[in-house]
Amino acid sequence: MYSVANYGSMIADRVRMDAYARALQQSVKPGSVVLDIGTGTGICALLACQLGARRVYAVEPSDAIQVAREIAAANGYADRIEFIQDLSTNITLPERADVIVSDLRGVLPFLGSHFASIADARRRHLATGGAMIPQRDTLWAAIVTAPKLYADFVEPWEVHNHGFDMQAARKLVLNSWGKGRVEPEQLLTEPKLWAELNYATLEEQNVAAELEWKVTQNGEAHGVMVWFDAVLADGVGFSNAPGVGAAVYGSALFPFLESVQLEIGDDVQVRLSANLVVDDYLWSWRSTIRRQGIVKAEFQQSTFFGTPLSPLQLRRRASDFLPKLNDDGQIVSFILACMTGAHSLGEIAEQLLAEFPARFADHKTALAKVSELSQQFSR
């Protein structure tokens, strides 16, 4: 979840925020009904009211929604904004929205259930002929020389290793990606289109595509840089491409396992894929670099390989593993079983203390555990 300070950084990003304000100005008419998904501290909901929206449904699962309520009241819009603390996929509105606005991206648009949430909102909450903000995101990729960004991955294990062999850690971090910025002159190839996400029709949550380049500039290649151009409304958008764009987003560097010296005319092939697994994306990038048909370098990388997994963890994930609750699991199971609507949190805490006296020092600590689970699972 974002902190209030994080939301402040988003609002302070003038490139992003001015674009969203212009898109709302184009789409919201007097009397419009607006659905703001992931309202945060409520800036888009406030703008919609300012533009004449009759009703705004502001949806936010985190406690930042309380700040949004206070801000709405302070600005005289509390009576026109209905704040709903939940996921948009869990709610049913009394009417359809003329405009749905959201910014559920991370560094890239691939973040958790972003695409599923937008597709659900489009099907269930958008009025016929209604507007979606954003309309689409287009993702681009290029091979880059980025020595400073690459150093962030490798220097702790190569330079600051105090003389120890830390290659095991180096390999892990180079199977992850990181946020960063590069300048246009750092591109060793021209940008190539990787994916276009049209939110008016998008259903698929996974993306994979093969990218091929002919190197146009000599240099030391450190990986694949990915960024996106956003279209929020007709003629309104922003980009976080190298050299321009919204500071809050950055771009994503998918590093190579080793830097490679490229020459003009080299051929580079990269298959980049993003696959949603439960609630997070698994990224894979397979890279082959050839000089006149001869392979100079070849890498097979995945964020799966960037996660340390002990034999015990792997065994617990096996399909034939027979799981049994540990002590913490038994406590959670006991508390959830008591949440039938017939007992107060205080009463459940008393039962918990009686059942697990060795785990809880007093009623206060038992109540804290019960309250934690209540916040997460109760309705």
Image (tube, grey):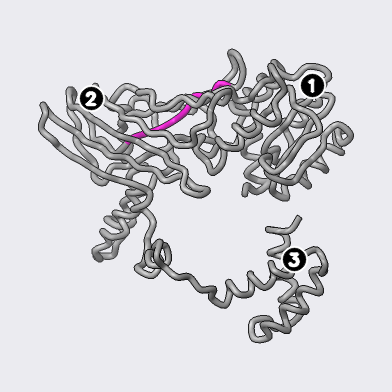
Left/right of residue 372 with respect to residue 33 in the rendered view? left
Residue denoted by label 1: 32
Task: Give the camera-side residue of 377 and 366.
Answer: 377
Image x and y of residue 171, in percent:
29, 54
Mark 1 near mark 3, Cβ–Cβ under 8 Å?
Answer: no
Residue denoted by label 2: 215
Specify which label sits upstream in the sequence, 3 or 2: 2
In this rendering, which labeled residue sits more in front, label 1 or label 2? 1
Image x and y of residue 55, in percent:
82, 28
Question: Residue 339 got which mark?
Answer: 3
What's the residue type where badge 1 is placed? Ser
What's the residue type where badge 3 is placed? Met
Residue in view at x 37 percent, y 60 percent? 308
User: Principal SS element in the magenta part?
Assistant: strand
Mark 3 lies on a secondary structure that is loop
Q: Quadrant of residue 237?
A: top right
Mark 1 near mark 2, Cβ–Cβ under 8 Å?
Answer: no
Q: Quadrant of residue 96?
A: top right
- Residue 49 in the magenta stretch? The answer is no
In this rendering, which labeled residue sits more in front, label 3 or label 2? 3
